[in-house]
Amino acid sequence: MIPTRILTTQAATGTLTGLALGDALGFPTEFNDVPAILAKCGPWRGMRLPEPAFVTDDTQMTLALGRGIRTAMDQGLLTPERMTGPVRQEFVRWNRSPDNNRAPGRTCLEACALLEGDRVWQEASRTGSKGCGANMRVTPVGLVPGLSDEQRAGAAQLQAALTHGHPTALAASDLTARAVHLLAQGAEPLGLVGQLRSYAYENRGRYLTRWLGDLWRYTHDASPEAFISRGWDECLAALATVQDALLRPSPETDPCERTGDGWIAEEALATALHCFLLFPEEPLTALRRAACTRGDSDSIACLTGALAGAHLGAGAWPKEWSERIEYRSDLLSLAALWDA
């Protein structure tokens, strides 16, 4: 059995704050290679939070998902019938917002534009896309208290599928929510990758029909099981790269060289896990390492911050950073609901 600690103090506050801080720290370094980042920011271990601390669509869509789930649960237990409408509306609202000017991903823009109509959501889903936009925003699903494993998995996969219908996007979102949940419940970082691999093996052939409906029919797969197993297999391969990287840790080397650049869902999760597990008790160092990468640095760093915050709670982040983050009041409002 994996040893656990007591529940993390204010895990939701720590998680959402860490996500936004990582997003803001990685925003200026996205699309830069490491030499360019070092030339711009100086040594990576001393990287400073930008002034002002603007975030990207990663945090904006996290808030949209969180608000949608809150609305759904105001009506009762979380079900796909209750969740789909509010989350869909929040995604459309985000897409139409004038603040949606932070280099959002094409898949999110295309799918959210289609969600605005009256078509079934499966027709809007981009089933060929496994971009990290699916799991960069899933953190709230791992924080909501009282969900069953089936509800958590279903909600994580459904919110992904509204825009990114590729099975790897679904599986990576499920795994990201699972990781946040485990850490918030006190799981030790040392055993986290092993727990996630076991979870992936257990769910490899399980298609969540109640939550996904007939999404699989919009692909070339012969069956729902064949569809979803493709995603779990790619995520299992990505988790194996994390295990291999941590056998021979190299903190001064760009983590993307070992676990991928993070533009796609399974690599964003893998490289965020890599950065977090290099420095599980040093949250700012983990964030800085994630932001100083050649890949999708804002998404890698936001997921790294979410993992660190779930593990260490609100106390992980210095006030001089957390008090400057954009959307602070919105983040704290959602977090307070779930921490309570």
Image (cartoon, rainbow, N blue to C red):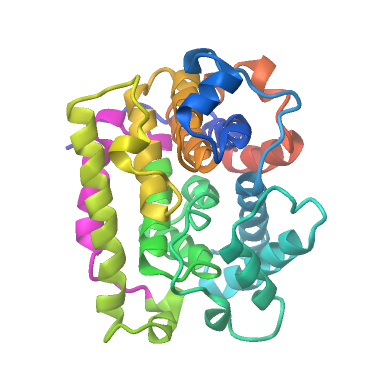
Q: Position of residue 107 (x, y in %)?
A: 57, 65
Residue 120 located left or right of residue 311: right
Q: Which region shows up in magenta? A: 183-208
Residue 110, placed above or below residue 284: below
**Residue at the (48%, 14%) spot, across then down:** 45
List the single residue furthest toward the right: 98
Q: Position of residue 339 (x, y in %)?
A: 57, 37
**Residue at the (49%, 69%) spot, across then down:** 161
**Secondary structure predominantly adopted by residues drawn in magenta:** helix
* Residue 184 highlighted magenta (yes or no): yes
In which quarter of the view is residue 152 placed? bottom left
Q: Of residues 112 and 14, which is closer to you in this image?
A: 112
Q: Of residues 50 and 222, which is closer to you in this image?
A: 50
Residue 231 located left or right of residue 143: left
* Residue 202 highlighted magenta (yes or no): yes
Residue 122, placed above or below residue 288: below
Quarter of the picture holding the N terminus: top left
Quarter of the picture holding the C terminus: top right
Q: Position of residue 187 (x, y in %)?
A: 32, 34
Q: Position of residue 274 (x, y in %)?
A: 33, 34
**Residue at the (67%, 55%) spot, across then down:** 64
Residue 336 located left or right of residue 264: right
Residue 63, placed above or below residue 123: above
**Residue at the (67%, 38%) spot, across then down:** 55
Q: How many marks?
A: 0
Does the rendering let one see residue 36? yes
Does the rendering let one see residue 313? no
